[in-house]
Amino acid sequence: MTRQELIKHIITCAYKNKAGHIAPALSILQILMTMYNDVLKPDDQFILSKGHGCLALYAVLMDKGILSEEEFYTFTQFESILGGHPSSRKIPDVKLSTGSLGHGLPFAVGLAMARKINNLPGIVYCLIGDGEANEGSIWEAVAIAGHRYLDNIVCIVDNNKSSERALEIDRKGSSIADKFSAFHWSTYCGGDSLVYLEPAMRNNGTTTKAVIIDTIKGHGCRPMENDPSWHHRQPKTEEELNQLLSEIY
Amino acid sequence: MRQEFYKLLTKEFKTNPKLVIVLGDIGVHSLKECFDHDPKRIINIGICEQAMIGVCAGLADAGFRVVVHSIAPFVTERCYEQLKLLAYERKNVCIVSVGGSYNYAKLGITHHCPNDIAILSKIPGMLVTCPRNAIEAIDCVTFVRELFPGPMYVRLEEKESTGPFLINKYSTNGVVYVLGCGIKNRERFKDINAQIIFTNTPSIESFLHGLRYRKWLDHVTYEHRKLITVIEPCADSGMLSQLVRMYRNIERIEYIGVPNRFIDKYGSQDEIDKYLNLDDDSIYNRLEELYGTIN
């Protein structure tokens, strides 16, 4: 499916089930499509640390045939395997239950360290949000990985700058990249297009890498873009749904 | 007890290639032999307890049996949410603490942790143990966890408690239920006219107790409906409420443990024990009041 088609499914699913963080999901949708279509190899592992973006993950898993469309549309229903945050107990493709922020990256560092002990190949990818980077545990994990020169982990930052409303991590003179660099990580920064970031995400096993991607919250649906009110709300009426679907690009 | 545990852990480390030790910047010198033997499998992660538990979850996910070690308040209260997730994810991580309650009396309230057992017992799927000596502690790290997949808390006390972890004697006056090192000198209590049970798990429904004592306790409490006293070297672990739920016919229940307040004194652990009436003499006097003595 195209990105536009997946966006349509995400918004419609959230509307039908009156649940879901649509705008955070759209912020990471392109990243997840790239991960699952072009980056992840059989030996790799992926952790979605910002669990509230899970509608994008579910949509991509549906696109890959791991979830059926019927399963996708049970999102947050009583017997559904798809919660408002992903659970590893319910979804085989999810390695760690996330939702509370700041847990995924330490776990990913542990996975990467285990691979080093066992001399196993493969890269561990972890997607965090820039807002999530308010959490101290993220920087603890960054310090651990940098200190140990873990070259088999890649941290991807969904830098949609919505955290400017809270604690601003990415600011002039001290960007997120600067902060990762201070802990001996190599950093790659770019815009929403992943065309030139894809090679950076293909870790060549030389250094600990952070890929900081400038994204737009609600990307792909004009009325939602950079509108904080869409962080955790859904279309209220059929009319509003149709209006949003008509604004997908 | 701590040094003895380190020796036993070193022995286990050398023979079990699946064991990974993660240290929160303590025990590094004492476990030097492990670093010399296989530095890949013993990691001094630094002073970052929240990420440390997450890292342990990742290591356990890869099939390692992880022992993580730090001072009680830092490896329980500081990273409580991470421990909750560890239990939900059923990761085989053994959290070994030192300094529970007020073992580090001189260091003040930031290093006190009387609530460790209470708060960890509230996490579903977390097995909480309070071994009375290093051998019981290493048993927890090895064979108990083989039978109990998922995270487990092992609270190492500074001082060992003597004797086997068994019943004192038979009496119909009632039951004294002692957790871990709640009583330091078991022999001191021989003439109390009550049955005294020493155990090392705060959950009477959990594995160890269920295996050895459940039937016996059922019998005693049901038949005699007498006074039950719980003695703990910590704040209320929840054992009281469990007993009340399980045995509704108990006539009276008493509790001896660390009170729910900040301890505003320094000094030694023994001095704090005495200050809180948790030294053996004070406990003996209280039990004598409650149960009387033989002869």
Image (tube, grey):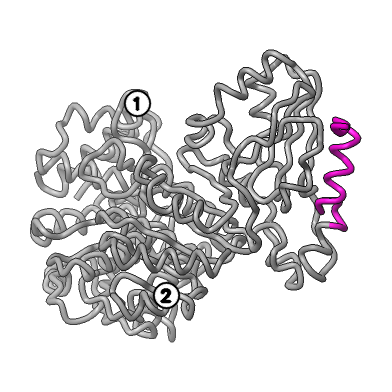
Chain of the residue where label 1 is placed in the rendered structure: A
The answer to whether residue A193 is visible is: no
The residue tagged 2 is: B44
Q: Residues within 10 Å of mark 1 (few under 14, many from 20)?
A: some
| SS of the residue under disc 1 | loop
Residue closest to the eye, A225 or B140: B140
The residue tagged 1 is: A77
The answer to whether residue A81 is visible is: yes
- The spot of residue A20 in percent (x, y) is 37, 39
The answer to whether B12 appears left or right of A150 in the picture is right
Query: Which residue shows up at 13% across the image and 69% down it?
Result: A198
Residue closest to the eye, B139 or B163: B163
Say which of marks 2 and 1 sits in front.
2
Residue closest to the eye, A127 or B23: B23
Q: Is residue A57 magenta?
A: no
| SS of the residue under disc 2 | strand
* Contact, mark 2 vs mark 1 (Cβ under 8 Å): no
Vertical order, B118 against B73 (above or below) = above
Viewport quadrant of the N terminus of chain A? top left
Residue closest to the eye, A246 or B7: B7
Q: Residues within 10 Å of mark 2 (few under 14, many from 20)?
A: some
User: What residue type is disc 2 on?
Assistant: Asn
Secondary structure mostly seen in magenta is: helix
Q: Which residues are magenta?
A: B274-295
Query: Which residue shows up at 37% across the image and 82% down it?
Result: A183
Quarter of the image where one finds residue B12: bottom left
User: What residue type is disc 1 on?
Assistant: Gln
